[in-house]
Image: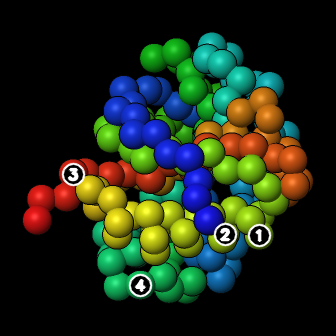
Amino acid sequence: MSIPVKIINYSPVAMVGCSVSMSYENNKTFELWKSFMSRKKELTNTIGPNLYSIQDYPESFLKSGFNPEVYFTKWACIEVEANSNIPEGFKAFNFHGGLYAVFSHKGDHQKFIENWQWILNWWLPQSNYKLDQRVHFEILGPKYKNNSHDSEEKICIPIVPRID
């Protein structure tokens, strides 16, 4: 298995969206995105068509091995112009940017899980980088089709150079 990767230094951007506290065992992704998408038209001053699925993991989340019971914050967001009006029920999310390894993913949810495991268990240990304690996210662009074999998205993991 090999997935194309680009190293990108993202700039900070303003986003607006919805969030939920969840674990992978108590997964609320469907409910989060259903709620966000049903109200997305209320957001003005959006920038571009891309949606962002953001995971804000606690510091210990991936350091001690994957534990599906650990809670984290998941966001459904869209980029907006700075200082945009935020409708009630939405929250501001300030993406701080930074260095990310960006992988092109094509496939359904099961393939996504396989690719994510490959990234963390094979690519990352073999690379010149290590995980950084910042948000992980996926860019859901125009070719994203929820759980379709034809779906395309970008998987973005926060990295810093490894100093060994």
Q: Earlier in the sequence, mark 4 or mark 1?
A: 4
Check disc 4 and give the amino acid type.
Answer: Gly
Q: Secondary structure at mark 4?
A: loop
Quickly name the residue at label 1: 110
Pointer 3 with pointer 1, Cβ within 8 A: no
Considering depth in this image, is 70 or 159 the residue closer to the camera?
159
Check disc 3 and give the amino acid type.
Answer: Pro
Gap in angstroms between the C-alphas marked 2 and 4: 15 Å
Q: Is residue 163 above or below residue 91?
A: below
Gap in angstroms between the C-alphas marked 4 and 1: 20 Å
Quickly name the residue at label 2: 113
Check disc 1 and give the amino acid type.
Answer: Gln
Pointer 2 with pointer 4, Cβ within 8 A: no
Gap in angstroms between the C-alphas marked 3 and 1: 30 Å
Quickly name the residue at label 3: 161
Quickly name the residue at label 4: 65
Packing grade of label 4 (10 A; few <14, some 14-19, many >=20) is few
Considering depth in this image, is 158 or 28 the residue closer to the camera?
158
Q: Position of residue 113 (x, y in %)?
A: 66, 69
Residue in the image at 40% along x and 75% along y? 61
For the C terminus, give its image quadrant. Answer: bottom left
